[in-house]
Image: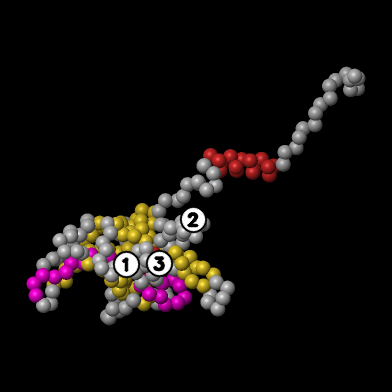
């Protein structure tokens, strides 16, 4: 076996590695360190208090206050006690919509109030009205800031909580290529069809005690 000219050994040519491959490899390493694509840490909900404003995309919602209210019975002694939550809501959409109802089976604006803790579940749910139009109203007009009051009747003998916390969701516009242009739906926390609504903020309000009979 003959040696190369000059008596030296043949040098191997370096193998060229594309820069893009190195970048991709580094990216995969970071992803693996975070536990994979599906397990990357999610951003926790914002923790907010009285006066906080949450942009729910379809609505801009300010959490003003929470209080107890006593309503005397017109026809005898005693009365009813309520927990009221006051919000200032601006409809950012192009069409009039309703105040709706909160919770799992909610609709319109208030379905973006995903849960309240501790839960108060009066029969039929809370009354959700707009309080600043002279007569009870449940219409949120585009571009108008309205005072929305959620009124929960407290069961007899139950003390009102010292504070309440709302899990707040946000909306997204679902395009539809039909006669109907589209609709607002709750943003989900995941890609699966049965993913729960995404909680973007948790707002805690101390409950102010009003006069009681």
Residue receiving disc 2: 190
Residue receiving disc 1: 87
Report x, y in % for residue 176: 55, 72
The image quadrant of residue 78 is bottom left
The residue that appears at 60% across and 42% down in the rendered structure is 28
Identify whether 23 is placed above or below 110: above
The residue that appears at 51% across and 57% down in the rendered structure is 191
Residue receiving disc 3: 60
The residue that appears at 55% across and 78% down in the rendered structure is 179
**Is the magenta region chiefly helix, strand or loop?**
strand
Q: Is residue 77 left or right of residue 160?
A: left
| Towards the viewer: 116 or 48 | 116
Q: Of marks 1 and 2, which one's residue comes earlier in the chain?
A: 1
Q: Residue furthest left?
A: 77
Give the label, 1 or 2, closer to the camera: 2
**Disc 3/disc 2 C-alpha distance (Å):** 23 Å
The image quadrant of residue 88 is bottom left
Q: Is residue 149 left or right of residue 27?
A: left
Residues rendered magenta in the picture: 76-99
**Disc 3/disc 1 C-alpha distance (Å):** 10 Å
Q: Badge 1: few (under 14), some or many (20 or more) residues near its Cα, within 10 Å?
A: many
As drawn, the label of residue 51 is none
- Count of numbered badges drawn on the protein: 3
| Towards the viewer: 37 or 209 | 37
Report x, y in % for residue 69: 19, 67
């Amino acid at each position: 076996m003959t040696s190369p000219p000059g008596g030296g050994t043949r040098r191997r040519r370096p193998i060229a590695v594309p820069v893009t491959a190195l970048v991709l490899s580094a990216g995969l390493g970071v992803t693996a360190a975070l536990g994979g694509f599906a397990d990357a840490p999610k951003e926790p909900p914002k923790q907010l208090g009285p006066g906080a404003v949450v942009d729910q995309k379809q609505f801009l919602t300010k959490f003003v206050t929470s209080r107890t209210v006593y309503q005397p019975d017109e026809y005898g002694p005693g009365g009813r006690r309520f927990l009221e939550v006051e919000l200032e809501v601006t409809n950012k959409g192009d069409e009039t919509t309703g105040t709706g109802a909160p919770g799992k089976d909610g609709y319109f604006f208030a379905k973006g109030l995903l849960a309240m803790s501790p839960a108060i579940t009066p029969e039929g749910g809370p009354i959700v009205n707009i309080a600043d139009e002279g007569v009870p109203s449940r219409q949120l007009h585009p571009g108008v800031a309205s005072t929305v009051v959620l009124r929960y009747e407290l069961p007899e003998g139950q003390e009102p909580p010292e504070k309440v916390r709302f899990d707040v969701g946000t909306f997204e516009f679902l395009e539809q290529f039909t006669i109907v242009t589209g609709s607002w739906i709750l943003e989900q926390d995941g890609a699966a069809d049965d993913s729960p609504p995404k909680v973007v903020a948790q707002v805690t309000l101390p409950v102010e005690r009003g006069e009681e009979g």
